[in-house]
Image: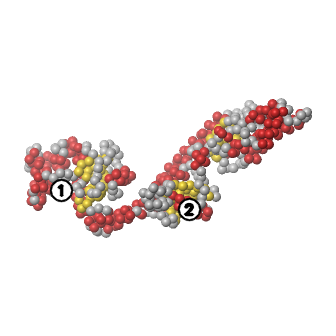
């Protein structure tokens, strides 16, 4: 089982792109030179920090380039060994070690270099020994704190980098940089900041390109393998989709066998182990490291037990963001096709395409009676996209959503009463059975037009019954068709007349409802009056025409 990374270590490094030490050394204007420690091209720094403390450990987060001018260190050629010993003793860290601290303490206490009556050459040797012990303790504390490198500035305190410091850095594997007198520490820090800004911009560009690539893969004919393949390419590792039973459904990329097995085990950590809604829940993600390979597992949002596993040889700052985008896309791809509702909708669609009547496929969609909802964004909001339409459908309690011509159409079971939604204008049809879906679609369209014209959040078709219900339907329909016969070949005139009557003869609101100019409304109503040979200013005529439009399904 991979050993999870402790949260404290993850938080110890600032969340910024690291800078390769080699990039800083390449800045010719700084004149930095590495004189000790490993020349590892993989060494990175997260910031530059200046400190003249003898024990910088409490002030380091980890990953810094620590800059010092050696103010806390006495030069090797000190004229008064006793004084040097006293100053060094004051600067030795508490954990410098018994040998180093004892030597310094002993020398400082005596004030004579530790050798009574010794010749000057012997005193110099003792001073050098104390300095070696001091630097060994100092460098070990920097390494213990997680420092990435040490920069030692020449002048005004030291003309050269102390040999004892060079030896200590070689011994502890800490890169040591010589900072020339002409280069200030603030200049080094500024160069690090510039390199970090460049790295951050490059990382943002990398993440953006990866997001676009993953989205394109999700729209391909074989989306799941394509998304995994793109993800593996972008993070330079392996991407795996595990099924609810833990089986590997699809994979892309390569990784060591040990990492493959560990990734499979890590996927089990985030896979739900209890029924949905139980108080016991698995984490949404987990991470770990095996043999230098970084592992991450993401529970997909469908709740069906699908898990995305990612194994990478390194962990760049943007990898988590890229993997999270892939997890969201795979959640959508697996959720729709694997859930029971998604399977039922697919079956209903296939039957409709093969010629089955709507009333035969309606039970597969979960209802006997339905309402159709037409919706448009309120005010001057932009046209809805697929995400906004899906959100509206979820708010109305249905996944049967379609977007066309800036109108969202939702098929909602009558068990879920549509309510007004913030930011939307809705038109709702009367409840119908499956056979009446086309008529309900027309009703919802007209209700939406009325809602927009009256600036009402929601309008329902036929909310109240009237006197027209007392007339036998067959006689009413015959009379209506006879009355409207002159307009039978002009559907635009019929639609304009219906909207104009429903809005009490308002030219402006009718123009808004039909998305035409108000003069066009005037011209069409004038043609209607001429064709019907009727005075449309007469309320009785208007009432009779409205009755006729309702009987023919046009109102």
**Which residue is farthest front?**
279
Q: Indicate whether 408 appears above or below 89.
A: below
Label 1 crowding class (10 Å Cα cut-off): few <14, some 14-19, many 20+? few
Q: In this orientation, which residue lies closer to the viewer: 72 or 32?
A: 72
Q: Which mark is residue 553?
A: 1
Check the image and tell me how it is coloured. secondary structure
Location of residue 24 in the rendering, given as x and y in whole percent from the top left corner: 65, 42
Local SS, label 1? loop
Q: Indicate whether 91 appears above or below 336.
A: above
Location of residue 145 in the rendering, given as x and y in whole percent from the top left corner: 67, 44
Q: CA distance from mark 2 to mark 1?
A: 62 Å
Question: What residue is rendered at 59% in x and 54% in y?
Answer: 4
- Residue 143 sits in quarter: top right
Taking the image as shown, residue 5 lies to the left or right of residue 112, namely left
Taking the image as shown, residue 36 lies to the left or right of residue 439, namely right
Local SS, label 2? helix
Q: Indicate whether 497 appears above or below 109.
A: below
Task: Say which residue label 2 marks.
Answer: 265
Q: Is residue 176 visible?
A: no
Location of residue 483 in the rendering, given as x and y in whole percent from the top left corner: 10, 55
Asked whether disc 2 touches disc 1, contact meaning CB atoms under 8 Å apart, the reply is no
Q: Is residue 411 visible?
A: yes
């Amino acid at each position: 089982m991979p050993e999870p990374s402790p949260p404290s270590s993850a938080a110890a490094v600032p969340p910024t792109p690291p800078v390769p030490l080699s990039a800083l050394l390449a800045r010719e204007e700084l004149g930095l030179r590495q004189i000790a420690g490993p020349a590892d091209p993989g060494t990175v720094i997260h910031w530059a920090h200046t400190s003249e403390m003898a024990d910088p450990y409490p002030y380091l987060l980890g990953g810094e380039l620590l800059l010092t001018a050696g103010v806390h260190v006495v030069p090797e050629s000190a004229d008064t060994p006793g004084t040097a010993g006293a100053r060094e003793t004051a600067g030795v860290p508490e954990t410098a070690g018994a040998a180093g601290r004892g030597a310094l303490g002993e020398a400082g206490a005596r004030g004579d270099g530790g050798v009574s009556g010794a010749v000057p050459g012997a005193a110099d040797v003792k001073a050098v020994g104390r300095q070696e012990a001091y630097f060994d303790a100092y460098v070990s504390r920097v390494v213990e704190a997680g420092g990435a490198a040490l920069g030692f500035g020449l002048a005004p305190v030291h003309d050269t980098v102390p040999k004892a410091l060079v030896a200590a850095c070689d011994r502890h594997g800490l890169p040591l940089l010589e900072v020339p007198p002409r280069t200030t520490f603030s200049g080094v820090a500024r160069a690090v900041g510039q390199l970090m800004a460049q790295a951050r911009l490059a990382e943002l560009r990398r993440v953006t390109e990866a997001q676009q690539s993953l989205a394109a893969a999700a729209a391909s004919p074989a989306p799941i393998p394509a998304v995994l393949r793109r993800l593996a390419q972008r993070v330079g590792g392996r991407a795996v989709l595990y099924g609810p039973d833990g089986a590997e459904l699809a994979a892309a990329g390569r990784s060591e066998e040990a990492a493959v097995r560990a990734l499979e085990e890590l996927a089990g950590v985030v896979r739900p182990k209890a029924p949905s809604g139980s108080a016991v829940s698995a984490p949404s993600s987990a991470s770990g490291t095996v043999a230098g390979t970084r592992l991450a597992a993401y529970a997909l949002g469908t709740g069906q037990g699908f898990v995305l596993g990612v194994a990478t040889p390194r962990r760049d700052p943007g990898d988590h963001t890229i993997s999270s985008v892939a997890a969201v896309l795979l959640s959508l791809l697996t959720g729709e096709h694997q859930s029971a509702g998604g399977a039922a909708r697919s079956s209903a669609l296939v039957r409709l395409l093969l010629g089955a009547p709507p009333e035969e496929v309606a039970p597969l969609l979960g209802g006997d009676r339905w309402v159709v909802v037409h919706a448009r964004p309120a005010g001057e909001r932009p046209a809805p996209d697929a995400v906004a339409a899906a959100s509206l459908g979820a708010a109305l309690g249905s996944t049967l959503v379609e977007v066309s011509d800036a109108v969202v159409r939702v098929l909602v079971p009558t068990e879920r009463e549509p309510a007004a939604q913030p930011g939307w204008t809705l038109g709702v049809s009367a409840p119908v059975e499956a056979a009446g879906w086309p008529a309900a679609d027309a009703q919802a369209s007209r209700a939406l037009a009325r809602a927009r014209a009256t600036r009402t959040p929601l309008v329902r078709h036929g909310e109240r019954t009237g006197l027209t219900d007392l007339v036998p339907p067959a006689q009413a329909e015959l009379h209506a068709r006879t009355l409207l016969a002159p307009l039978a070949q002009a559907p635009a005139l019929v639609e304009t007349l219906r909207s104009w009557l429903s809005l009490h003869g308002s030219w402006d609101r009718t123009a808004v409802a039909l998305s035409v100019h108000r003069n066009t409304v005037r011209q069409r109503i004038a043609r209607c009056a001429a064709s019907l040979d009727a005075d449309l200013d007469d309320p009785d005529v208007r009432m009779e025409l409205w009755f006729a439009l309702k009987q023919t399904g046009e109102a």
